[in-house]
Image (spheres, grey):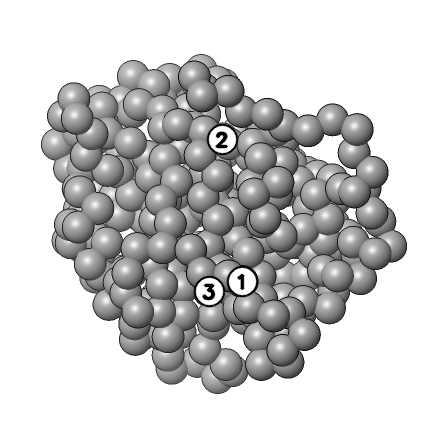
């Protein structure tokens, strides 16, 4: 990975982001058409083109019903979904992050994977969901296998964006692992399931990760009958600067580098820590 840009350069001092809140389908080809249509919309709406577009978890293909075979529809990292995101990133001239089901060696339980494609169409980052959603009466591990705890961080202008997926949000040590690897922005694609207090957990945890790490947090969520929506952009002091309800929507925001730097000057908690996250090789 190249050295991050100089944050004093005014040309990269503000990153423009767009979160796509949508309801995914269980038809991969139709879902690719839907994703392409969202990018068409981005190119026709007024305002600057985003430097970063974030699609939800499962943007390649929805989880589907409990008995839906995700191994049968999983794709490799050079498959059609990643190719689509690569084309859109080149068209955009920015970074695109999205969630997919990636083929694994065992052929039955794929990875729940986030990919980040750069402005040149190359794969800049891969994050395989480390914590599977075996909670609230659901067992994601029956259909998917966990990825390793790897800090995947990509550059977007003067910002460094760490990737984590949905249920990973409930584990603050994972967010801190990304921050220790240089992330000042956490990107959290999700398919956060609706339920009693679940929406409150989503919004509370997004703000908590922003406050405790003095970083930007980008929560891009699926919506629809099953998922909660409520995608939002949160600043390093925990302020929600842009958000959606539970309808399909684009959430746009500008992330000034100066706002991040000011928050970390006023609240130097990261520098004052007395404990650090250490990840053993066996994790």
Sort mark 3 into few (<14), some (14-19) or many (20+) by Cα contacts within 10 Å: many
Label 2 to label 3: alpha-carbon separation = 22 Å
Observer-nearest residue: 283 or 194? 283
Question: Does 137 appear above or below 270?
Answer: above
Q: Nearer the viewer, mark 2 or mark 3?
A: 3
Residue 14 image point, x, y percent: 61, 73
Give me the residue at 66% from left, 40% from top: 209
The residue that disc 1 covers is: 4
Relative side of 99 to 280, left or right? left
Q: Earlier in the sequence, mark 2 or mark 3?
A: 3
Tell whether label 2 touches label 1 (CB within 8 Å). no
* Residue 217 appears in view: yes
**Helix, strand, or loop for circle 1?**
loop
Q: Tell me the mark number nearer the camera, choosing from 1 and 2.
A: 1
Badge 1, how many Cα within 10 Å: few under 14, some, many 20+?
A: some
Circle 3 is placed at which residue position? Answer: 52
Question: In front here: 234 or 277?
Answer: 277
List x then y, in percent, for residue 231.
54, 51
Residue 244 in sight in this render: no
The front one of 167 and 41 is 167
């Amino acid at each position: 990975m190249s050295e991050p840009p100089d944050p004093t350069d005014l040309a990269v001092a503000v990153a423009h982001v767009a979160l796509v809140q949508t309801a995914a389908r269980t038809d991969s080809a139709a879902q690719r058409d839907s994703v392409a249509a969202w990018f068409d919309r981005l190119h026709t709406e007024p305002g600057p083109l985003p430097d970063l577009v974030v699609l939800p978890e499962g943007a390649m293909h929805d989880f589907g019903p409990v008995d839906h075979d995700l191994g049968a529809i999983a794709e490799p990292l050079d498959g059609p979904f990643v190719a689509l995101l690569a084309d859109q990133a080149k068209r955009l001239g920015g970074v695109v992050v999205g969630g997919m089901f990636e083929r694994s060696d065992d052929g039955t339980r794929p990875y729940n994977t986030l990919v980040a494609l750069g402005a040149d169409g190359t794969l800049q980052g891969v994050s395989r969901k480390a914590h599977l959603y075996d909670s609230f009466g659901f067992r994601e591990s029956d259909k998917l296998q966990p990825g390793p705890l790897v800090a995947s961080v990509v550059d977007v202008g003067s910002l460094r964006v760490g990737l984590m997926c949905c249920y990973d949000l409930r584990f603050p040590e994972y967010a801190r692992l990304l921050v220790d690897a240089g992330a000042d922005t956490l990107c959290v694609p999700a398919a956060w399931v609706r339920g009693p207090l679940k929406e409150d957990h989503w919004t509370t945890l997004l703000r908590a990760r922003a406050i405790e790490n003095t970083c930007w947090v980008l929560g891009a969520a699926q919506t629809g009958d099953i998922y909660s929506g409520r995608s939002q952009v949160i600043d390093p002091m925990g302020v929600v600067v842009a958000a959606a309800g539970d309808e399909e929507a684009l959430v746009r925001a500008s992330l000034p580098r100066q706002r991040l730097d000011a928050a970390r000057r006023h609240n130097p908690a990261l520098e004052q820590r007395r404990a650090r996250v250490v990840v053993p090789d066996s994790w």
